[in-house]
Image (cartoon, rainbow, N blue to C red):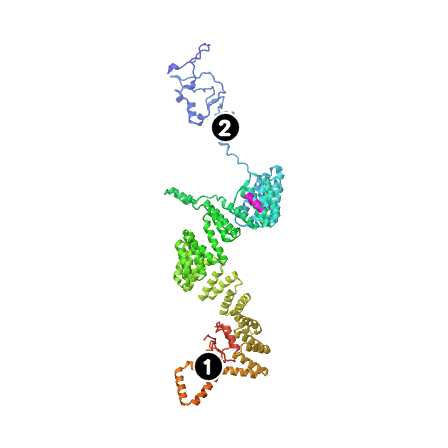
């Protein structure tokens, strides 16, 4: 080791070859373990400081080197600097020359090592934001305006239009304050034009949504006239839409055209939509030629279903048959831009592929495709039904042409629907035979079309009460498509008509299982349960149906009727009130409600509803009879006269109404009018006993000479009645004993027999003067003729009297002997 030790010369003599054996002691690694300064630097972070730059010139100053027998001295720095931490001239050598690290030149000897300056305490706190500064106020106000605009848009999307308008107005007020503050602080060039535009546009939109059209137009004008807003001319389309809603079609067309001029040609879709609006406005104004030009341009540039349909409407308005055909062909040729249904059918049994297909089979894109296809079919079907009756000499030939065109297009499945519509057109023209023949053509078609045609045929035969044919076609429809709810409902109807209610209920239940929204089946099963007297189940069915059809008058009436059958008049009246709120002019419902109030003893409410029923339908005999009886019961006979007179006009062959009129005159004290009325009744019904009785009484009270004449007629009629009664009684007795007695008397005394024969001839002459055999007889114990008149054409059955009417009869003729209600003989 000592071979490489170079001892310093003892003298300073110049040596020409000195220095060749010198080496940098920094590279002496053998003595590093004994170097105290180096070991201290290694143990601390100071040994990992960046290398020192070469700005300090190196030095050749030798350092003492430890010898094998001498003490060790500290190694000098390789750059000639003092060792780290060494003390020179009373000052500790710093770790670095950067003062920010916490060292100073004047540091005292023995000061603590604090490179991070922790002895100086914590750092001062951050400077607080000055919220009172104008810039901060502007920033907060701008944030608030944006929030108000967003809240306004959200409220509009939720349907709260009033709240949306209030938010929009508040945003407009705050935005104006913001602009004024910004102008005071900064130059006008720094104003946020985008925020101003969004605030004004949202305010105009909310005005339009709330139908405040003048305010919306004024706001749009502010935006359009400001040249600082780019592309503001497009908002003239919105202004045109507002004028269109106001039916100001000339200004609407003007603004549409102004917007069209300001939109560059590169925005093709926007221009097409504006042209569509212009064409629709021309149709509303009746300028069909201009509308045709607009729609023809659209069909050339970008064909669409709406434009094609509107073009057909325009040609239909002008009556151009050939152009209608061409426009229909253009409509058929519009591409649908939807995927084929085969895309959603799995080509193999790959589970991953099947999962993907199931995921996309009913996603939003697929739903949009279905909606687009349904809209296309609706346009085509409507257009075909519109032009078919006018493009040819007959609607049948027109339908045939439309069917051929549809069959050659991508909508081939619509051809069968057009054929069925052709049959429906025959029905509207009341040509049932042609309708049936057209529907029978589908018997050899595929199952779905066959089922639809058979369902319609079953319906037609059911309406014509040909239940056997209706049942056979209903069976055909069910066999073709077991899941067709309409076919099952028709089959249930035919079974219901035959009285098999249990089986009909099964068909209705199956229809509901296939389609829970089939309201016809649900209504019919309710009627079936009602027929079977299963009132609770029927009520459940109609209540479910009421939840679906809230304003169905039939459903409301059935519920009220079931409650009436269940002897719950309060619920029945409540549901009838709901029925009247839906159909306030239904006289039958009003009379039904009046009858319920009458049965409950509330005469005033009953009179109100009976009177309303009479006002809407003044020909209901039951209502007229009740109103007349009500006025008699309340001692207003004069008011009852008009009702009985109307009843006599409706039923002129019923004598009781005219007798009631005369009775009302007599009870009110107008005896002369009562006498004239009784005389008129006697002229029409000369054999009416009751009329003659009142004539005799009135003539006696007044002292008229005609009393003897009427008394004679009354006595003759009473005798005739007695003779009739005797004949009836003798006819009831056994004819054998009577015939034996006659034979005995004839054998004993021939002369007496001749006298009896003469008396028999006179009796026969009197009997011929009696009414005919088909006239009814009274069934009462007093055996008097009834006061009613019988039509010569045959007997007529009277309606059963109400309780009020019977009380009137008893009170009116209390001093007379009257028979009970009549029954035909």
The location of residue 161, given as percent across then percent down, is 55, 50
Which SS type dominates the magenta stretch? helix
**Closer to the camera, 718 or 108?**
718
**Quarter of the image holding residue 509?**
bottom left
The location of residue 48, given as percent across then percent down, is 44, 26
Q: Let me know if residue 540 appears in the view.
A: no
Q: Are dots 1 and 2 in contact, CB under 8 Å?
A: no
Residue drawn at (38%, 15%), measured in percent from left and top? 2
Whether 59 is drawn above or below 781: the answer is above
Q: Is residue 292 magenta?
A: yes
**Closer to the camera, 175 or 531?**
531
Q: Is residue 221 magenta?
A: no
Query: Which region is colored magenta?
Result: 290-298
Residue drawn at (63%, 42%), measured in percent from left and top? 225
Q: Residues within 10 Å of mark 2 (few under 14, many from 20)?
A: some
Which SS class for mark 2? Answer: helix
Quadrant for the C terminus in the image: bottom left
**Quarter of the image holding residue 4?**
top left
> Which numbered marker is on residue 632?
none
Whether 220 is drawn above or below 538: the answer is above
Pair 1/2: label in front: 1
**Quarter of the image holding residue 236?**
top right
Q: Which residue is mark 1?
A: 725
**Closer to the camera, 329 or 777?**
329
> Which numbered marker is on residue 101?
2
The location of residue 313, given as percent across then percent down, is 55, 49
Quadrant for the N terminus in the image: top left
Q: Let me know if residue 104 appears in the view.
A: yes
């Amino acid at each position: 080791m000592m071979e490489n030790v170079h001892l310093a010369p003892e003298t300073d003599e110049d040596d020409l070859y000195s220095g060749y054996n010198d080496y940098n002691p920094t590279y002496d690694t053998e003595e590093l373990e004994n170097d105290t300064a180096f070991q201290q630097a290694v143990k601390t972070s100071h040994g990992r400081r960046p290398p020192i730059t070469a700005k300090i010139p190196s030095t050749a100053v030798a350092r003492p080197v430890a010898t094998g027998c001498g003490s060790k001295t500290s190694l000098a720095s390789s750059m000639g600097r003092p060792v780290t931490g060494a003390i020179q001239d009373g000052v500790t050598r710093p770790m670095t020359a950067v003062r920010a690290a916490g060292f100073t030149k004047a540091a005292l000897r023995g000061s603590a090592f604090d490179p991070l300056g922790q002895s100086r305490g914590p750092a001062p706190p951050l400077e607080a934001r000055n919220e009172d500064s104008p810039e901060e106020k502007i920033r907060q106000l701008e944030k608030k305006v944006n929030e108000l605009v967003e809240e306004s848009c959200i409220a509009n999307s939720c349907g709260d239009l009033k709240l949306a308008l209030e938010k929009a107005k508040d945003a407009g007020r705050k935005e104006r304050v913001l602009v004024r503050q910004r102008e005071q602080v900064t130059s006008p060039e720094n104003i946020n034009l985008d925020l101003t535009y969004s605030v004004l546009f949202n305010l105009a939109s909310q005005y339009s949504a709330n139908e405040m059209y003048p305010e919306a137009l004024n706001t749009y004008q502010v935006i359009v006239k400001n040249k600082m807003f780019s592309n503001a001319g497009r908002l003239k389309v919105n202004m045109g839409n507002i004028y269109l809603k106001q039916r100001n079609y000339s200004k609407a067309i003007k603004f549409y055209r102004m917007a069209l001029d300001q939109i560059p040609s590169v925005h093709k879709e926007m221009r097409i939509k504006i042209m569509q609006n212009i064409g629709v406005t021309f149709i509303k104004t009746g300028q069909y030629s201009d509308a045709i030009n607009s729609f023809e341009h659209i069909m050339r540039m970008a064909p669409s279903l709406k434009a094609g349909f509107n073009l057909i409407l325009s040609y239909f308005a002008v009556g151009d048959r050939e152009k209608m055909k061409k426009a229909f062909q253009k409509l058929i040729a519009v591409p649908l831009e939807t995927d084929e249904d085969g895309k959603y059918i799995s080509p193999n049994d790959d589970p991953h592929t099947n999962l993907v297909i199931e995921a996309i089979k009913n996603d939003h894109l697929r739903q949009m495709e279905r909606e687009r296809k349904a809209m296309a079919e609706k346009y085509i079907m409507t257009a075909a039904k519109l032009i078919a009756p006018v493009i040819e000499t007959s609607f049948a030939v027109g339908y045939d042409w439309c069917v051929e065109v549809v069959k050659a297009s991508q909508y081939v499945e619509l051809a069968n629907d057009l054929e069925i519509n052709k049959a429906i057109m025959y029905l509207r023209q009341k040509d049932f035979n042609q309708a049936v023949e057209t529907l029978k053509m589908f018997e050899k078609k595929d199952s779905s079309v066959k089922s639809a045609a058979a369902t319609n045929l079953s319906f037609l035969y059911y309406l014509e009460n040909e239940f056997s044919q209706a049942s056979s076609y209903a069976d055909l429809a069910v066999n073709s498509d077991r899941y067709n709810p309409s076919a099952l409902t028709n089959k249930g109807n035919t079974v219901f008509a035959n009285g098999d209610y249990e089986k009909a209920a099964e068909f209705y239940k199956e229809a509901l299982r296939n389609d829970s929204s089939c309201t016809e089946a649900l209504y019919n099963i309710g009627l079936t349960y009602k027929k079977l007297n299963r009132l609770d189940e029927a009520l459940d069915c109609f209540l479910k149906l009421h939840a679906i059809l809230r304003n169905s008058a039939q459903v409301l009436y059935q519920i009220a009727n079931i409650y009436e059958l269940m002897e719950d008049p309060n619920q029945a009246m409540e549901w009838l009130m709901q029925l009247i709120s839906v159909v306030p002019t239904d006289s039958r419902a009003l009379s039904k409600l009046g009858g319920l109030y009458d049965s409950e003893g509330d005469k005033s409410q009953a009179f109100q509803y009976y009177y309303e029923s009479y006002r809407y339908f003044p020909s209901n005999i039951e209502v007229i009879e009740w109103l007349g009886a009500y006025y008699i019961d309340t001692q207003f006979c004069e008011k009852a006269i008009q009702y009985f007179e109307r009843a006599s006009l409706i039923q002129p062959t019923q004598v009781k109404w005219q007798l009631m009129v005369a009775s009302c005159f007599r009870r009110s004290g107008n005896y002369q009018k009562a006498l004239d009325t009784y005389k008129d009744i006697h002229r029409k019904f000369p054999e009416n006993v009751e009329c003659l009785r009142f004539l005799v009484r009135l003539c006696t009270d007044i002292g008229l000479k005609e009393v003897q004449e009427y008394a004679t007629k009354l006595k003759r009629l009473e005798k005739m009645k007695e003779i009739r009664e005797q004949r009836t009684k003798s006819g009831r007795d056994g004819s054998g004993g009577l015939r034996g007695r006659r034979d005995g008397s004839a054998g004993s005394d021939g002369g007496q027999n001749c006298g009896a024969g003469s008396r028999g001839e006179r009796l026969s002459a009197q009997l011929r003067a009696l009414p005919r055999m088909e006239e009814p007889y009274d069934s009462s114990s007093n055996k008097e003729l009834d006061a009613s008149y019988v039509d010569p054409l045959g007997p007529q059955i009277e309606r059963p009297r109400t309780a009020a009417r019977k009380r009137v009869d008893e009170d009116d003729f209390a001093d007379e002997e009257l028979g009970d209600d009549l029954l035909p003989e």
